[in-house]
Image: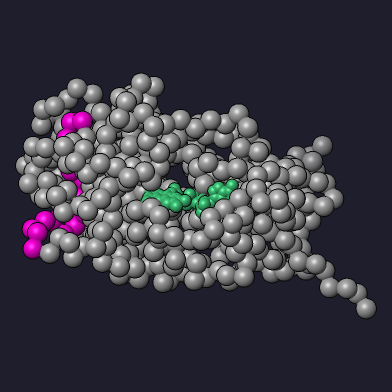
């Protein structure tokens, strides 16, 4: 009697948006065991608003995560425009962003509390496969045994393939690319989420809006489960911040008074929304240089999500990029999966190369635009929900310049309406035609 072949063991470091989406995706492969290792002892409601564009939403639908798309879990604009830009003082609408090729209303940009998106993904992952309190410390790659993943608590786990989905401060990335550095862009978001009933009786535009001034922006919008978000913020010189901003860390309690002071003189709606905002937390924005590769350990390790692309949350793209990465990993591994049994290490390596060939050029373009158009030239970027700040637009303080600035914003439809599946097919076809060409050349020799 032949012994059944052992399953392919896939370990995922980090059970955030990318890690959960990867687990949901990769469980669809035959003969795999997927385990998630998460540093947190429990999942709690840290974070604020996060936006998903049509790309991320379509991908979730393909993965069967319909519960995340439901109105109520998230909120979409009532109007046709997924982003509205208003004048900071007059409230006049300066510009809109409208989707290009979104026919299903469920695919229009949706805003969530991050914890609700996370919970919707969690419903699709067996809890028995999630190991909490497992903070990755280091990794050994062995030619025969595969990967040994070591945790801070002294325990370890073995796997054939490791997915590093451990976020912007990724331990997996640090292990394989120790010289990669993150820097603070100088932008600090001041975020709050609260029950929208706190705004009962307040008159404000129902659709989320981005209010812009020459040196600052403010964002407000409804979120799923009756929540509301306000996002303000400030930019300082990261090399020489004023003392009060010197040691701000992620999720620190911020000063409400300081937040309100930043918006003195703004339109009464903005001031009222800030008056009603019950607390604020600080989110210093971090970013890093693009990586040349996301595949390490001789083809047994791959980075996805913020671990792979430290783009500083620009264009509210982080959540959708992470989800598309996870789905792309499924497509590329399916492509190399043998009809019987599990793939060899060489086949997996080839699958990861296809993944990288599909995602790296696209994400590289996103990062370049983030660096040149947003972080370097216009604004230091923002996080998550379209609240990327219109900070630091030079010395322009006149309305005409403000209008010109808004009208010259980059068109980001190619980011938030990106079709990861079409990209993957193009890469496979290009590879196939290269193979045909090589065969032709061989036959002509
Ligand atoms: C708690 C939290 C709150 C957030 N809040 C917001 C928000 O309000 N708005 C927004 O736009 N973006 C937020 N983000 C970031 C946003 O989720 C990501 O930019 C995006 O969704 C990409 O997801 P990701 O899975 O790559 O990274 P993340 O969502 O950051 O997930 C990374 C996961 O890896 C875990 N992890 C980190 N290091 C290790 C380690 N060494 N070992 C094991 N596990 C590890 C983290 O605890 C986390 O669960 C938040 C991230 C976190 C972790």
Residue 15, by quadrant, is bottom right
Residue 293 appears at what percent x and percent y? 61, 38
Residue 72, by quadrant, is bottom left
Which residue is at 54% across, 58% downward? 41
Dominant secondary structure of the residues highlighted in magenta in the image: loop
Residue 114 appears in the rendering: yes
Camera-side residue of 202 and 50: 202
Q: Is residue 201 above or below residue 138?
A: below
- What residue range appears in magenta? 201-215
* Colour scheme: one colour
Residue 315 appears in the rendering: no
Camera-side residue of 81 and 284: 284
Q: Is residue 356 above or below residue 57?
A: above
Q: Is 272 displayed left or right of 81 in the figure?
A: left
Residue 249 appears at what percent x and percent y? 40, 38
Which residue is at 76% across, 45% downward? 141
Residue furthest out toward the bottom: 1
Which residue is at 16% across, 54% downward? 276
Q: Is 436 displayed left or right of 174 in the figure?
A: right
Camera-side residue of 150 and 370: 150
Question: Magenta segment: does it hold 208?
Answer: yes
Q: Quadrant of the N terminus?
A: bottom right
Q: Is residue 230 above or below residue 59?
A: above
Residue 199 appears at what percent x and percent y? 15, 60
Residue 321 appears at what percent x and percent y? 46, 50
Residue 202, by quadrant, is bottom left
Camera-side residue of 165 and 276: 276
Which residue is at 11% across, 27% downward? 398
Question: Magenta segment: does it hold 404?
Answer: no
Residue furthest out toward the right: 1
Q: Quadrant of the C terminus?
A: top right
């Amino acid at each position: 009697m032949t012994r059944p072949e052992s399953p392919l063991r896939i370990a995922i470091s980090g059970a955030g948006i990318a890690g959960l989406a990867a687990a949901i995706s990769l469980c669809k492969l035959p003969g795999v065991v997927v385990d998630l290792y998460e540093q947190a002892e429990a999942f709690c409601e840290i974070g604020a608003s996060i936006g998903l564009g049509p790309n991320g939403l379509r991908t979730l639908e393909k993965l069967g995560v319909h519960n995340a798309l439901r109105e109520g879990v998230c909120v979409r604009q009532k109007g046709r425009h997924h982003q509205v830009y208003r004048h900071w003082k007059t409230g006049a609408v300066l510009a809109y962003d409208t989707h290009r090729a979104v026919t299903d209303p469920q695919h229009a940009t949706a805003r969530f509390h991050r914890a609700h998106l996370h919970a919707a993904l969690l419903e699709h992952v067996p809890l028995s496969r999630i190991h909490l309190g497992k903070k990755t410390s280091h990794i050994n790659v062995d030619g025969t045994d595969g990967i040994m993943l070591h945790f801070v608590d002294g325990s370890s786990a073995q796997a054939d393939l490791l997915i590093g989905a451990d976020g912007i401060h990724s331990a997996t990335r640090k292990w394989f690319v120790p010289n990669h550095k993150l820097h603070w862009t100088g932008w600090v978001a001041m975020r709050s989420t609260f029950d929208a009933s706190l705004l009962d009786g307040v008159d404000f535009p129902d659709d989320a809006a981005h209010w812009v001034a020459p040196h600052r922006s403010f964002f407000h919008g409804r979120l799923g489960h009756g929540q509301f978000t306000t996002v303000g913020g400030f930019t300082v010189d990261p090399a020489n911040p004023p003392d009060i901003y010197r040691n701000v860390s992620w999720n620190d309690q911020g000063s409400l008074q300081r937040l309100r002071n930043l918006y003195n003189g703004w339109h009464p709606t903005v001031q009222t929304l800030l008056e009603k905002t019950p607390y604020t937390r600080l989110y210093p924005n971090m970013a890093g240089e693009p990586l040349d590769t996301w595949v390490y350990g001789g083809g047994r390790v791959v980075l996805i999500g913020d671990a792979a692309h430290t783009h500083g949350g620009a264009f509210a793209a982080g959540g959708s990029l992470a989800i598309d990465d996870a789905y792309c990993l499924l497509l590329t591994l399916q492509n190399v999966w043998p009809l019987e049994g599990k793939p060899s290490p060489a086949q997996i390596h080839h699958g990861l190369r296809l993944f990288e060939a599909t995602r790296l050029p696209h994400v590289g373009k996103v990062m370049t635009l983030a660096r040149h158009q947003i972080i370097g030239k216009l604004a230091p970027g923002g996080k998550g929900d379209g609240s990327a700040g219109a900070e630091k637009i030079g010395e322009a303080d006149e309305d005409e310049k403000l209008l010109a600035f808004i009208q010259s914003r980059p068109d980001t439809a190619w980011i938030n309406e990106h079709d990861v599946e079409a990209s993957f097919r193009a890469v496979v076809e290009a590879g196939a035609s290269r193979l045909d060409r090589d065969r032709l050349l061989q036959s002509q020799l």
